[in-house]
Image (cartoon, grey):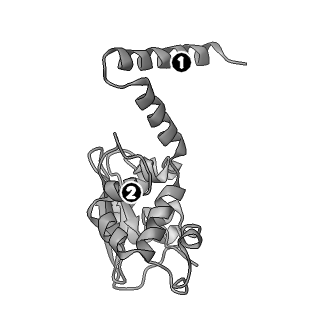
Amino acid sequence: MTTLLEADTDRLLAAVRALLVQKGIATPEEIAERIESTDAASPALGARMVARAWVDPEFRALMLSDGARAAETLGIVMRGAPPLGVMECTEDTHVLVVCTLCSCYPRAVLGYPPYWYKSAAYRARAVREPRGLLAEFGTVLPEGTRIRLVDSTADYRWMVLPLRPPGTEDWDEDRLAAIVRAGDMIGVTQVHA
């Protein structure tokens, strides 16, 4: 049963959509496409990007230079989303993404952020004590590994291209994508085969 509040919310949302169309800001088709792409966004999209980058050097180069364009080549709708930057983990540098101000997150390719990503505790600890924070996620880095903290903002979103785990050299893209988790693509966890 629809409550009065839900009915009011539905009417308000319909009025906002109608106003966007009336003012020429968006067409009904553009609104429907945006809703569809928002509903379809999930970590599986980012995992597809990571897997492709692991097997295709040209795609990897594109992803690292222009994450949004790379996403669009895979059919991921990026129109209206902030630019997407991608930072690569290496053997000696681990990348960790945080939004120090609020909860900016690359939703177009990772879906909605986990509840803890928005917490003040996560944001503060990522800056003050990233090694301790990572350890709580089970990510214990070798001594000497540098941690590069990247701040996602309203103007520019970031995701991580994690290291490909050893023993996956003969795996295809689908199998690789299946082992990549949301945490791997913001740097709190590492991919394991």
Task: Give the mark, 1 or 2, whose residue is nearer the N terminus.
Answer: 1
At which x and y percent is residue 193?
58, 79
Q: Please give the name of the residue rendered at 35% of the width and 79% of the height, measured from the top-left corner.
A: 90
Q: Is residue 4 above or below residue 189?
A: above
Disc sitting over residue 73 in the figure: 2
Residue 161, quarter of the rendered image: bottom left
Between residue 124 and residue 51, name the one nearer to us: 51
Three-letter amino acid code at the position of disc 1: Thr
The residue positioned 40% from the left and 51% from the top of the image is 106
Query: How far across and how far down the image is residue 150, in percent?
Result: 30, 61
Crowdedness near tag 1: few (<14), some (14–19) or many (≥20) residues, C-alpha within 10 Å: few
- Please tell me whether mark 1 sits on a helix, a strand or a loop: helix
Q: Secondary structure at mark 2?
A: helix
Type of amino acid under label 2: Thr
Is residue 39 visible to the viewer in this orientation of the structure? yes
Q: Residue furthest right?
A: 1
Position of 28 relative to 182 (above/below): above
Tell me: 3 left or right of 146: right
Tell me where residue 119 appears, x and y as whole percent: 45, 48
> Quick one: 7 or 75, which is closer to the camera?
75
For label 2, the crowd category at 10 Å Cα-Cα, with few meaning under 14, some 14 to 19 and many 20 or more, is some
Residue with the mark numbered 1: 9
Pinpoint residue 19: horizontal percent, then vertical percent.
Answer: 38, 15
Name the residue nearer the viewer: 69 or 178.
69
